[in-house]
Amino acid sequence: MTLLHAASREALASAELKLLDASDFGTVGDDLFAVVGLFTREAGLRRALADASADPERRTGLVRSLFAGKLADESVELLAAVVASRWSSPRELVDGVESLARTALLVNAERAGKLDTVEDELFRLGRIVAADGELERLLSDSAAPVEGKLTLLSSLVASKVDAITAKLAEALVAYPRGRRAVEGLEELADLAAKRRERSVAHVTSVVALTEQQQERLAATLQRIYSRPIALHVEVDPELLGGLVVKVGDEIIDGSAAGRIDALRRRLAG
């Protein structure tokens, strides 16, 4: 999601508090993603609902008239609260609704004890797509029919991932909103990790790490960063040996390839 301006950040924070009162996070998440699709298609509607000069009661009335009986009651009331707030732009209103939809599904996964699974599946799905340039191109093609992209995604994940993982990936493919597939899947995996109040370490190793090795690495990183760290591990034989660990913008390069590159730079300098 793009960075929000101050008014939109305040509106989203208020809506997130209301979201946590929901009784059925799965239904609310599904409803909100449907609304993201509608807002994405209907520029006039999103402009009208984000118009800060319009009476808030008029905006909430429009939401209720549009969605009453079509969405769950608690989804309608959440949307009414969303549009009653001040948003910096129509795009940021849609950004906010999308953020709420993602949060709702991740909370649903958390309450069901599936958040670890969803996070891991999103990361692995991102790696699969990243490794296939043609697949990445097809899923990211904004001009391609949505139905075709969803069919392709379904062939990739059908019966292989949790339903919540599938819904998050489907929404990304259907409403990319400027994101490529790999970028969006990585963003979703990071959101799932942050939901557990953990940082994410993207680890690249020349060979697969054993469970014990991963536990030792996670413990070491936790001591370094003074907070729990979630590991996302992928294998790259081109490293020659060792590990590359990326936490946020910081890279810890212990690979043979990294050391060789560093030596080359020193010699060249």
Image (cartoon, rainbow, N blue to C red):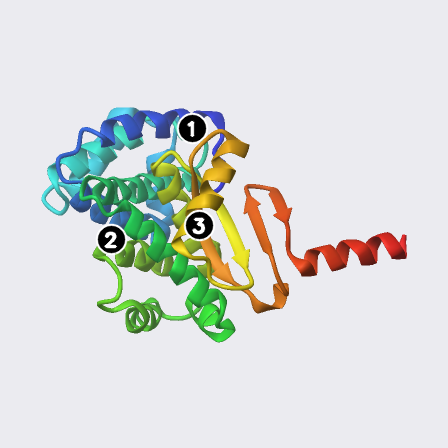
Nearest the eye: 1 or 61 = 1
Which structural element holds mark 2? helix
Q: Secondary structure at mark 3?
A: helix
Is any part of residue 47 visible from this angle?
A: no
- Tag 3: residue type? Gln
Residue 162: image location, x then y, percent: 23, 57
Amino acid beneath label 1 = Arg
Q: Please say whether residue 237 is visible from this viewpoint.
A: yes
Quadrant where the N terminus is found in the figure: top left
Q: CA distance from mark 1 to mark 3?
A: 36 Å
Among numbered discs 1 and 3, the one appearing first in the sequence:
1
Q: Give the quadrant of residue 9.
A: top left
* Mark 1 surroundings: few (<14), some (14-19) or many (≥20) residues within 10 A: some
Identify the mark nearer the N-term, 2 or 3: 2
Q: Which mark is residue 9?
A: 1
Label 3 packing within 10 angstroms: few (<14), some (14-19), many (20+): some
The Cα atoms of the two marked residues, 1 and 2, are separated by 26 Å
Which amino acid, mark 2?
A: Ile
Of badges 1 and 3, the one in the foreground is 3
Residue under circle 3? 214
What label sits on residue 164 in the rendered view? 2
The 10 Å Cα crowd at callout 2, few under 14, some 14 to 19, many 20 or more, is many
The residue drawn where x is 49% and y is 65% is: 130
Residue 251 is left or right of residue 222, and the answer is: right
Q: Quadrant of residue 194?
A: top left
Q: Describe the element under mark 1 as helix, strand or loop.
A: helix
